[in-house]
Image: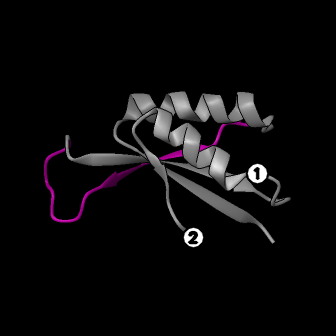
């Protein structure tokens, strides 16, 4: 089974930093996917969150550690 962890970040810069950090800290073979997520009902491009989608095919990543990393950048790990 392939588990996906979704980290929610306030802006693109934070998301890019977290993507690099995830690779460095957890030894991933490649950077996670970044996705812009416009907030519901918001038309302004400034009102968007960025998602870092981390694939975890071996289910070996520590969700608490991912949440702590996201929190360092004012983000959080989305509950499954």
Q: Is residue 42 magenta?
A: yes
For residue 6, the mark is none
Left/right placement of residue 50 relative to residue 44 reads right
* Spot occupied by residue 19 in the image (x, y as percentages of width and height): 59, 35
For residue 61, the mark is 1
Q: Quadrant of the C terminus?
A: bottom right
CA distance for labels 1 and 2: 14 Å
For image coordinates 49% across by 33% down, the residue present is 72
**First reached walking from the N terminus: tag 1 or tag 2:** 1
For image coordinates 35% across by 36% down, the residue present is 11
* Magenta residue span: 30-45
Specify the quadrant of the image occupied by residue 26. top right
For image coordinates 14% across by 47% down, the residue present is 44
- Mark 1, Cα crowd under 10 Å, few <14 / some 14-19 / many 20+, is some
* Spot occupied by residue 9 in the image (x, y as percentages of width and height): 41, 43
Residue that badge 2 annotates: 80
Magenta: main secondary structure: loop
* Spot occupied by residue 27 in the image (x, y as percentages of width and height): 80, 34
Query: Number of callouts in the render?
Result: 2
Left/right placement of residue 67 relative to residue 23 reads left
For image coordinates 73% across by 51% down, the residue present is 62
Q: Are marks 1 and 2 in contact (CB under 8 Å)?
A: no
- Mark 2, Cα crowd under 10 Å, few <14 / some 14-19 / many 20+, is few
The structure's colour scheme is one colour
- Report helix, strand or loop for mark 2: loop
Specify the quadrant of the image occupied by residue 18. top right
Q: Quadrant of the N terminus?
A: bottom right
Left/right placement of residue 7 relative to residue 66 reads left
Left/right placement of residue 21 relative to residue 39 reads right
- Report helix, strand or loop for mark 1: loop
């Amino acid at each position: 089974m392939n588990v996906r962890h979704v980290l929610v970040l306030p802006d693109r810069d934070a998301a890019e930093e977290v993507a690099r950090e995830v690779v460095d800290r957890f030894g991933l073979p490649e950077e996670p996917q970044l996705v812009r997520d416009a907030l519901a009902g918001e038309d302004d491009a400034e009102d968007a969150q960025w998602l870092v989608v981390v694939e975890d095919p071996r289910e070996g990543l520590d969700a608490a550690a991912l949440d702590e990393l996201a929190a360092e950048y004012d983000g959080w790990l989305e509950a499954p």
